[in-house]
Image: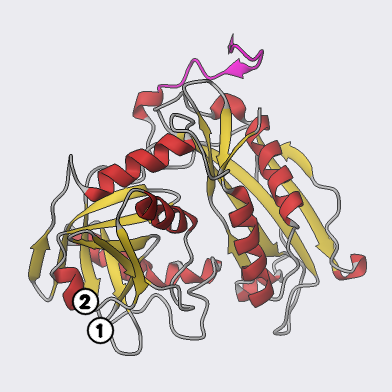
Amino acid sequence: MEMNSNGGEKCNFFNWDRLGFSLIPTDYMYTMSCSIDQKFTFSQGKLIPYGNIQLSPCSGILNYGQGLLEGLKAYKGEDNHIRLFRPAENALRMQTGAERMFMPSPSVGQFIDAVKQTALANKRWIPPAGKGSLYIRPLLMGTGPTLGLGPAPECTFLIYASPVGNYSMGPLHFLVEDNVYRAIPGGTGGIKAITNYSPVYKAILQAKAKGFSDVLFLDAVTRKTIEEASGCNIFIVKGNVISTPAVNGSVLPGITRKSIIEIALDIGYQMEERSILLEELLDADEAFCTGTAMVVNPVGSVTYHEKRINYKTGADTVSQKLLANLTGIQTGCIEDKKGWTMKID
């Protein structure tokens, strides 16, 4: 094992050029818990070796899906500093989700401190600048036993991490789904509940079997407006106007989404958050998706009832311009005038 310039070990055995988006176990994870006996006040957290955890067969997360997830990244810049991107936003979104799922949640300070500890404990796994990032996955789970329908008497906050490369290789090709719905009004589409994801697995796998990248979901009431894909927000471009579905309870308030809206306004685009008819998507000049995992990814085509619409991709597109601005800020190549990044080393 070789030492890096900061005196820590680095992964000189790992081929960062082959890094994809799949789990690579790192060294440590972070955990802290609270219970009804502690008046749901989280205990002092700690780092432990990465590994399996024990759960009661009667735990709230296993029996009733009482759980939330978050996702953020640690980046190494050309200056070799390690940065987080807007971690307080993840903490606040987890608090909103916890209120909906009737769970206690870490404070913003506890959340950020835990993320910092996890990133630094696994810093040898942070890819070099331009090769990827360390994906950090916080979980909030009802781990106490509860046979009857009701909130778990104990909750656990856990964070693990994995180095990742690009989530998607190339433009996305969507199949519009009009029989299965990701979210319903009054449901959990606006929070990162663990129960949001597995119900759409079948639709995704069926679409991939036909050669598509993912599924784009419509609203569950009118089936006329677009909402989002399985794990990312969507934007359309028409002329100088960029539009994205409004956050209305069934669309996730993505942190990358929020950041791209601000960047687009800063560089001169007109930005709209509103209901977007499917017909508007099919008539757009360009479309792209945003999310922590995929950052900003162009949409190459959308297919609806056998009708395929192709979009402009590649250099000189709006999505590429926005991607360059966002990643520049995240990695320290562009001055962060908004206070979005946090150096942790």
**Which residue appears at 74% of the width and 48% of the height?**
31
What amino acid is found at the position of numbered circle 1 in the picture? Lys
Residue at image mark 1: 224
Please state if 85 lies on the left or on the right of 333 as rendered. right
The C terminus appears in which quarter of the rendering? top right
Mark on residue 278? 2
Please state if 45 lies on the left or on the right of 177 as rendered. right
Residue 342 x, y percent position in the rendering: 61, 38
**Secondary structure under badge 1?**
loop
Say if 216 sits above or below 328 in the image.
Answer: below
Q: Are marks 2 and 1 in contact (CB under 8 Å)?
A: yes
* Residue toward you, 227 or 22: 227
Please tell me in which quadrant of the rendered image residue 38 appears. Answer: bottom right
The residue stretch that appears in magenta? 1-15
Residue 301 x, y percent position in the rendering: 15, 59
Q: Is residue 208 magenta?
A: no
Residue 311 x, y percent position in the rendering: 13, 56
Please tell me in which quadrant of the rendered image residue 145 appears. Answer: bottom right
What secondary structure is the magenta-colored segment mainly? loop
The N terminus appears in which quarter of the rendering? top right
**Which residue appears at 48% of the width and 70% of the height?**
196
Mark on residue 235? none
What amino acid is found at the position of numbered circle 2 in the picture? Leu
**Which residue appears at 48% of the width and 74% of the height?**
189
Please tell me in which quadrant of the rendered image residue 114 appears. Answer: top right
**Secondary structure under badge 2?**
helix
